[in-house]
Image (spheres, rainbow, N blue to C red):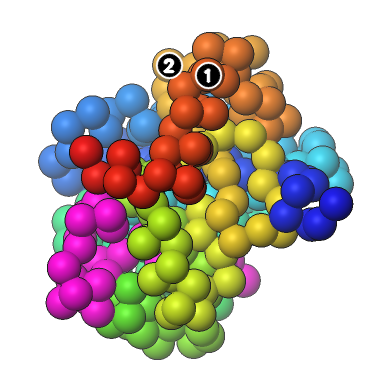
Amino acid sequence: MTAKDSPSQSVLIFHGIGTPGRTLEHGEAQYWLDREQFCAILDRIAAMGADAPLITFDDGNDSDCEIALPELQRRDLRAVFFLLTARLDQPGSLTSRQVRDLAQAGQIIGLHGHAHRDWRRLEAQDRLQEYHLARQQLSDLAGRDVNLAAAPFGFYDRQVIKDLREQGFAAVYTSDWGRAGAGFIRPRNCIDNRMSARAISDALAGHIPLARRPRRLLGLARKRLFPMWGRS
Ligand SMILES: [Zn+2]
């Protein structure tokens, strides 16, 4: 059995915390937690020791720095922040200075692209912007090479994976649920404000919710084996 076949860790996705400072995208509101919900989950993670999940944040909301960072530091936790360069210095999003602050605080900066686009549908010029130029800008701000990516909306297909590998990324994080191993494609478990205590426990452990299992299997097959389907 290879490392790729032996999932070892749950990976969580958080988005915004508190009150959004920008107009939300359609369907996004459920991914915003209030501070109390967020802190309660962090307390549980801090108590999990070696079994603790990896914490990630997507989209680069200003709450990453203003709320999440001090709460992570209070618990001696580290996270990966997947950022969008088109949103930097925009209302409600991180400033360039805050990205530097996150990196200098020992947090990890990752790539979520430039403009929050579906990476399966990029033209060649868009790929340069989404993968290469955005990564360069984030690496400059972080002061170190950014080599982790998270696919916007969890959308990917074989072409996306091939492109990211060719660009030299170490891994791409998705939204496929379950536990992540050392392979290139690493599933994550998305936290939203409608989850029951039981559902949050499942996410912390990387257990795939029963209701998601059939759809997840079909989705993985489609994304990894049959790229044509992914373009429908
Ligand atoms: Zn996103």
Quadrant of the image containing the C terminus: top left
Label 1 crowd (10 A; few <14 / some 14-19 / many >=20): few
Residue 208: % across, % down: 62, 25
In the image, residue 9 above or below residue 203 = below
Which quadrant would residue 62 be assigned to in this image? bottom left
Type of amino acid at the residue the image marks with label 1: Pro
The answer to if 121 sits in the magenta stretch is yes
Q: Which residue is mark 1?
A: 214
Name the side, left or right, on which 43 lies relative to 151.
right
Q: Which residues are magenta?
A: 106-130
Q: CA–CA distance between discs 2 and 1?
A: 21 Å
Type of amino acid at the residue the image marks with label 2: Arg
Q: Residue at x 81, y 57 (%)?
A: 2
Report the disc number at residue 106: none
In the image, residue 102 above or below residue 214 = below
Q: Earlier in the sequence, mark 2 or mark 1?
A: 2
Report the disc number at residue 194: 2
Name the side, left or right, on which 175 lies relative to 19.
right
Q: Residue at x 39, y 71 (%)?
A: 163
The answer to whether mark 2 and mark 1 are in CB contact below 8 A is no
As rendered, which of 109 and 125 lies closer to the eye?
A: 125
SS of the residue at dot 1?
helix
SS of the residue at dot 2?
loop
Name the side, left or right, on which 168 lies relative to 231.
right
Q: Is residue 86 visible?
A: no
Q: Residue at x 47, y 22 (%)?
A: 215
Residue 70: % across, % down: 55, 54
